[in-house]
Amino acid sequence: MKHNEFLFTGFYAGYSPIAPGTAGSLVGMALYFLEYLIFGEISWVVNLAFVAVLFYPCMRLADEGERFFCRKDPPQVVIDELLGYCVSVMFFPFNLKVALMAFFVFRLMDIIKPWPVNRLQNLRGGLGIMIDDFVAGLYTILIVLGIVLVLKLMHIDIY
């Protein structure tokens, strides 16, 4: 159980007294940077497979986190923010500016919870914990892609 606590709290980032969700997203961003440092540029297909393979185990860990903290979607369980951030950057080539933009857009999507994210978080257990951040990550992809395209039209190239 102790090593699972380490995982479902995002390497204990969920115990941050201020904005544990943001702390969990920062861990996701750190893992994204670490992936790049270790493996270099990775295909979006590999990133998609990584997210797909990890979704179910993360969902189970989130379930366990609810039981551990004896409440629905406890703030200390940030494995969802960690994987949600990974979703938000999975289709982009590594780029610091895009990574930071995705971080801020993802946090905004996770905080304001636009439809259907606001409904999905009501699903029970680990699925409800994970799916809203997954969809927030998908929204982030679309928004960041839109920003990158608008910047490109303005002849501002961030790549």
Image: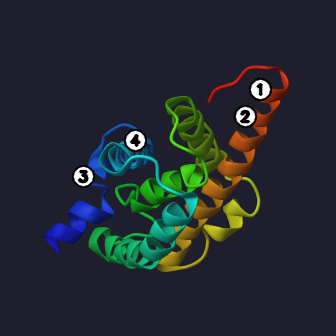
**Residue 11: quadrant of the picture:** bottom left
Badge 3 local density, few (<14 within 10 Å), some, or many (20+)?
some
Sequence-first disc among 2 and 4: 4
**In front: label 3 or label 2:** 2
Question: Which residue, given by chain and number where applicable, does mark 2 sit on?
Answer: 148
Q: Is residue 48 above or below residue 42?
A: below
Badge 1 local density, few (<14 within 10 Å), some, or many (20+)?
few
Give yes or no for contact between labels 2 and 1 (Cβ–Cβ under 8 Å).
Answer: yes
Q: CA distance from mark 3 to mark 2?
A: 33 Å
Question: Which residue, given by chain and number where applicable, does mark 1 sit on?
Answer: 151
Residue at the location (50% across, 51% down)? 85
**Residue 150: quadrant of the picture:** top right
Question: Which residue, given by chain and number where applicable, does mark 3 sit on?
Answer: 12
Residue 81 is situated, as x and y percent measured from the top left of the image, at: 47, 54
Residue 53 is situated, as x and y percent measured from the top left of the image, at: 45, 76
Residue at the location (27% across, 63% down)? 7
Q: CA distance from mark 2 to mark 4?
A: 22 Å
Looking at the picture, which amino acid does disc 4 mark? Leu
Sequence-first disc among 1 and 4: 4
Question: Which residue, given by chain and number where applicable, does mark 4 sit on?
Answer: 26
Residue 157 is situated, as x and y percent measured from the top left of the image, at: 69, 24
Sequence-first disc among 3 and 2: 3
Badge 4 local density, few (<14 within 10 Å), some, or many (20+)?
some
Badge 2 local density, few (<14 within 10 Å), some, or many (20+)?
some
**In front: label 1 or label 3:** 1
Which residue is farthest left? 2
**In front: label 4 or label 3:** 4
